[in-house]
Image: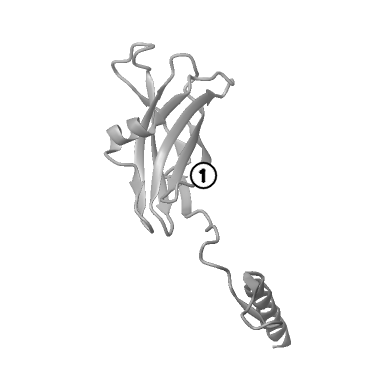
């Protein structure tokens, strides 16, 4: 029982220390008196994204029957990106995809700018506290082996126009 009390006391002390670290000390109207309270509301908030992930970290490449390199590569990798918003709306502003096969041979970079994303999905909005999936088919295989890694770089911004970049690696088999 004493171990439980010690743990509870340590948790309480840690909580008090963390709570007091977020307070500002400012002068009050009375000379010599100090007021302790929460930080002002105009302090910069933390970025509001709760996360970017892929629905599967390993994908089977699919063959394209009417392939004709370089216009139509022989393989595609279906990739679904899952975005979770926090307290603010999120907007996908850009996505880059780059495939490297198991022999380190690289496919050309494929970039999706904001305009292309809007054309493909209608909107890049992920509403506050919501989630949204963006599905892509990455074409490859004209100059590379069929297995390797697809690196995906996602740039999102929140409603205050703060940006964050996330990189995900997906195995292609």
Q: x, y percentage for residue 146? A: 47, 22
The residue shown at (28%, 32%) is 119
Position in image of residue 130 (x %, y %): 36, 56
Q: Nearer the viewer, residue 10 or 33?
A: 33
Give the residue displayed 69% in from the left and 88% down from the top.
Answer: 1
Asked whether the viewer can see residue 136, the reply is yes
Q: Can you say whether 44 is above or below 28 in the image? A: above
Residue 59 is left or right of residue 64, and the answer is right
- Residue drawn at x 52%, y 42% is 166
Image point (34%, 34%), residue name: 117
Residue 107 vs 34, above or below: the answer is: above
**Horizontal and vertical percent position of residue 147:** 50, 26
Question: In the image, is 101 to the left or to the right of 128?
Answer: right
Residue 94: image location, x then y, percent: 43, 35
Q: Seen from this angle, which residue lies furthest bottom?
A: 1
Q: Secondary structure at mark 1?
A: strand
Q: Out of 129 and 65, give the one closest to the viewer.
A: 129
Q: Is residue 105 above or below residue 21?
A: above
The residue that disc 1 covers is: 164
Taking 105 as reference, is 97 left or right? left
Q: Specify the color scheme.
A: one colour
Residue at the far top in the pictured view: 69
Work out whether residue 77 or residue 129 is closer to the camera in this orientation and state it: 129
């Amino acid at each position: 029982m004493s171990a439980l009390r010690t743990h509870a006391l340590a948790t309480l002390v840690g909580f008090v220390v963390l709570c007091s670290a977020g307070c500002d000390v400012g002068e009050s109207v009375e000379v010599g008196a100090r007021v302790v309270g929460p930080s002002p509301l105009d302090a910069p908030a933390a970025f509001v994204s709760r996360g970017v992930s892929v629905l599967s970290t390993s994908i089977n490449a699919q063959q394209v029957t009417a392939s004709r390199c370089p216009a139509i590569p022989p393989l595609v990798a279906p990739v679904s990106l899952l975005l979770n918003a926090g307290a603010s709306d999120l907007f996908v502003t850009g996505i880059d995809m780059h495939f490297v096969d198991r022999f380190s041979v690289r496919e050309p970079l494929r970039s999706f700018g904001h305009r292309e994303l809007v054309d493909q999905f209608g909107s890049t909005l992920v509403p506050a506290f919501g989630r949204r999936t963006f599905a892509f088919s990455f074409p490859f295989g004209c100059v590379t082996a069929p297995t390797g890694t697809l690196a995906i770089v996602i740039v999102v911004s929140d409603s205050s126009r703060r940006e964050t970049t996330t990189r995900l690696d997906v195995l292609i088999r």
